[in-house]
Amino acid sequence: MRTLVALALVLTGASLLAAQNTARTTTAPAPALPPLSQTCPMHPDIVESKPGTCPLCKMNLVPVRLDASWMCPVHAVVIEREAGTCRLCGRALVPVDVSLTWSCRGEVNAEFLEPGVCRDGSPRIGKRTLRPHGNHNPQHGGQFFMAPDTWHHLEGTLPRERLFRLHVYDDYARALPAAALAAIDGRVVTRQRFDAATRATIEDQAFALKPSKDGKALEATIARPPLPAAISVKVRFKPDAPEYRFDFTFRELTREPSGQPRRPTAPGAREPAPRTSVAAAAPAEAAPAYTAPSEPLPGTMAELIADLGKRRDDVRALVQKGDFGAIWVPAFQAKDVAVALEPHVDHLPEQARSHARPALADVVRTAWQLDAVGDTGNADEVGKAFTQFTEAVSRLLYAFSATP
C-alpha cells in the first residue's frame, strides 16, 4: 500500500513538474534573433539588407547577423550584454557593433549563423565578436574619425589650450604601437586660406606632430586657439601614401574620461545603441539588443515631403556646427523618407515622374555619401557631399510639388 502511495506521489510530482515546464514554455517563448544582413568580405563597413554586390569592390555580399553589445574602451576583451562599467578598470562601457555566431566544441572552423544542436546533442555556443569599424567611440574625450583608407582611425583632443593630441588606431580602434606612430608624417593647421590666384591652400599656421613622451599619441604645441576652435590635421601614414585631411571642431577643451563607475541617469535607463544595431533580441547565449528610439515615418505623402525637408535642415545644422560624426543620423532618416515616397511616384504626372525617379535615387546615393565622408571628417568633402544631397532633395521636392 505504501509503495502504491509513494508511486502515486511520484507520478503526481512528475505531472506537476511537466505542467510547470509546459507553462514556462507557453509563457516564455524563445526570443527572436536579430535579422540577417549582408556585408562585404573586404569592406565590412558596407552593410545591406538584401543580397547583392559590394558597391566598392563588386564582390558578392555574405550573410552576417549583427547586434549591439557593450565594450570597455580600454580593454577590448571585456564585451558585456548590458551597459555598465569595465570589470578591469571601472571605465563606462561603450556601445559597439558585433557579429553573432554559434559554434560546437571540438568542431574546428565550424561557425553557424543561428543557434541549434551540435552533433553530440549539446547546444551550440553563442559568441559575440567585435566587427571591424564596430567601435567608433572616442577613447580620450575627443572627436573620432575614420581615414579614407578605411583602416586607420583617428581621435583628436585638445586637453590644454596650446596642446593638440592625436591618437591613431587600427580598424578595431586599437591604438597603434609606438613604432607605427613614429612613421606617421603629420601637422596641425590652425590657420589657412585659399588663394584664388594660384587655386592653392596656403597654410599660415602649421605645427608638426611628434610622438608624445609615452609613445602613445602624436602631439603638437600650437598657437592658443579661440574657442570654439577649428583645427585641421593633415597626415601621411606612410611615405608613399596619400595625404589625408581631418577637420576637428572643439567647443571646449577635452577631458579624459574618468575611470570611476558612472551613476545611472534614471531607474532602468539605457544608453543608445550603435548605428547598425537591430531591434530584435538575441537568445540567452547571445545578448539582448539595445536600440536608440526611432521615429516612425509619416503616413501621408504630404507629411513625408515635409519630413524630408526637415531632415535636410537637420543635416545642414550639423554641417555648420562641424559635428560630422552625427550627420549619418538625419541623412539616413532622409534616405528612409525618400524610399517611403517611392510608391507615390506612380501617382505623379508623367513629366514629374521623369524628374522624381532619378532624384529619389540620388537622395539615397548622396545620403550614403554623407555617411561615408562624415566618418572621415574632411570638411571640404562633407561640403561637397552636402551640396549634392541638398540638390537631390530639392529636385525631389520640386517634382512632388507638381502633385495636384
Image (cartoon, rainbow, N blue to C red):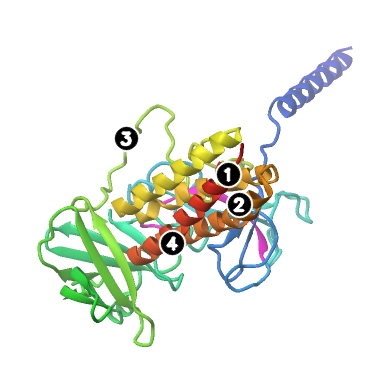
- Separation of residues labelled 4 and 1 (CA atoms): 23 Å
Q: Nearer the viewer, residue 265 or 147?
A: 147
Q: Nearer the viewer, mark 4 or mark 2?
A: 2
- Separation of residues labelled 4 and 2 (CA atoms): 20 Å
Which amino acid is tagged 2?
Answer: Ala
Q: Nearer the viewer, residue 391 or 138?
A: 391
User: Does residue 146 sit above or below 272 in this rendering?
Assistant: below
Which amino acid is tagged 3?
Answer: Arg
Percent of width and height locating residue 401: 55, 42
User: Does residue 27 sit above or below 139 in this rendering?
Assistant: above
Is residue 353 found left or right of 160 in the rendered image? Answer: right
Residue under numbered circle 4: 385
Residue under numbered circle 3: 263
Percent of width and height locating residue 256: 24, 53
- Which quadrant holds the C terminus? top right
Q: Provide the residue span drawn in magenta.
A: 61-75
Disc assigned to residue 356: 2
Circles 4 and 2, Cβ within 8 Å, touching? The answer is: no
Q: Classify residue 178 by image quadrant.
A: bottom left
Under circle 1, the secondary element is helix
Res 82 seen here? yes
Which amino acid is tagged 4?
Answer: Ala
- Which quadrant holds the N terminus? top right
Circles 2 and 1, Cβ within 8 Å, touching? The answer is: yes
- Separation of residues labelled 3 and 1 (CA atoms): 49 Å
Which amino acid is tagged 1?
Answer: Phe
Disc assigned to residue 400: 1
